[in-house]
Image: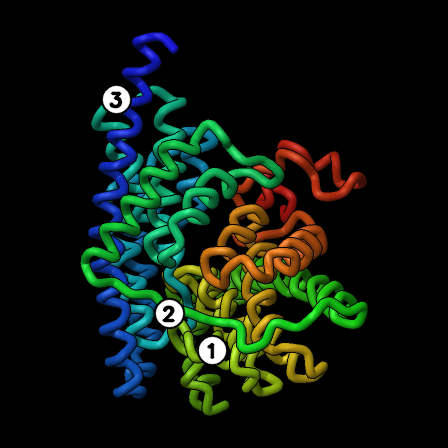
Amino acid sequence: MSFIQIKKTLKLSFLSLLVGIFMGLASSLFLSSLHLVTVIRENYPLLLLGLPLVGLFTVLIYQRYGKGSHKGNNLILESIHDEAPVPFRMAFLTFIFTILTHLFGGSVGREGTGVQIGGTLAYQISKFFKLDKSDSRLLLMAGISAGFGSVFGTPLSGALFGMEVAFIGKISIEAIIPCLIASFSANALCLSLGITHTQYRFLEMPQWTLILLMVIILSSVLFGWVGRLFSMAIHETKKILLKLFPHPLWRVFIGTSLVVVLLFSLDATRFGGLSIWLIQAGFDGKVALFDPFMKFMFTVLSLGSGLQGGEVTPLFGIGSSLGGLIGQLTSISPSLLAALGLLAVFGSAANTPFSTIVLGLELFGINALPFYVIAIFISYYASGHHGIYSSQIIHSSKRPHLAHHKGKTIGSLRK
């Protein structure tokens, strides 16, 4: 390695550490704020009535001042692919409006906010230090890793997620050092500032049997279909609302009003926000029959209407409750199937199988690794070329007959 290459590597490593430090501070503030507004909303459920006003405010501000920030995670991916500009205001906008959405009961997640803040910080740092296209791209991946790893407290899967999420069927190995540095430093700073993350454990680890294997295989196909349907449903909801209500303010007002009406009429206010209780219910084997569907519906309506927030935590809730329900119906370890559902529904919707396997190791330990691998790859295959990130480029097709999709984005296939 030449002196120039060593210098570039050291510079990129230092900047990755800088991204991690800034992201750790941002994640600590974000997660603390998220916990606070969740407690407030649970104590004052009538705050849900203000969700349509939050929706109007969100769309109005993003329209007037967003400069492309409404694209969210996809703008970060576009910047990796084509150097699309990422405005600094994106970090502030997604932070503020995700917190407001949670305060007033929108059924959204938190990963999107972390990834957008991390990507924005990385982009701004790369421009300030005048990095070339190659190093700027790697630093953007590091920003994604820092956001994901610190928000969920899973630095290793966060590092791999940043390397994997931009493409379907490709891991950007060249980004391994920046992604590791950014993800681990961001998470370490979060922990040092007192941030804690919810832990889930298997209540029962069954022995291998043919019946268990068949249940896991069939469940994994279902998990993949659910991940696929989730991404398609958000896209179709946006499309339907756009057709019915061309004006964006009417669109978000009607969509969020529908969320509020359904939450109250179905006595389902507990499905607002992150709904962490739903994940725990899956592991405890205490899932009601329609719980996965309810979270699915409210998240699709919330995100499809234009509210800010992520998809991952809702996907965790949908997957774990569905897995737990299958476990209850089959009398096969609901906690194991809840873990597999959590991983497989997320992994199939995000198209990130390898980082999802590592996520399983960080969240649940190594004992069930063979189960993770089976469930995640089957669901990944079953989901086809669909996903929650429309700017993902298909590098390697999942199936031979889809080889003509290579080089295209998920979004272009929808069109």
- Which quarter shows the N terminus? top left
Q: Secondary structure at mark 1?
A: helix
Vertical arrangement, residue 139 with respect to residue 108, above or below:
above
Q: What is the total number of numbered labels drawn onto the structure image?
A: 3
In this image, 400 relative to 76: left or right? right
Label 2 vs label 3, nearer the camera? 2
Name the residue tied to disc 3: 130
Q: Give me the C-alpha separation between circle 3 and circle 1.
A: 46 Å
Q: Nearer the viewer, residue 45 or 3?
A: 3
Of residues 330 and 61, the one drawn nearer to the viewer in this rendering = 330
Front in this rendered view, residue 376 or 367: 367
* Mark 1 or mark 2: whose residue is earlier in sequence: 2
Locate residue 338, reporting x and y percent: 57, 72
Q: Classify residue 407 by image quadrant.
A: top right
Residue type for callout 1: Gln
Looking at the image, tell me whether mark 2 or mark 3 is earlier in sequence order: 3
Taking depth in this image into account, of 397 and 267 the one nearest to the observer is 397
Residue at mark 2 to residue at mark 3: CA–CA distance: 39 Å
Q: Can you identify the residue that label 2 sits on? A: 198
Seen at 51% across and 68% down, the residue is 300
Horizontal and vertical percent for residue 195? 25, 63
- Alpha carbons under labels 1 and 2: distance apart: 10 Å
Q: Which residue is mark 1?
A: 280
Please name which of the two marks, 3 or 1, marks the residue nearer to the observer.
1
Mark sitting earlier along the chain (3/1): 3
| Residue 318 visible in image | yes
- Residue drawn at 45 percent across, 78 percent down: 259
Amino acid, disc 3: Lys
In the rendered image, residue 63, in percent from the top left (x then y), is placed at 32, 52
Depicted 292 relative to depicted 112: above or below: below
> Residue at 54% across / 35% down in the picture?
171
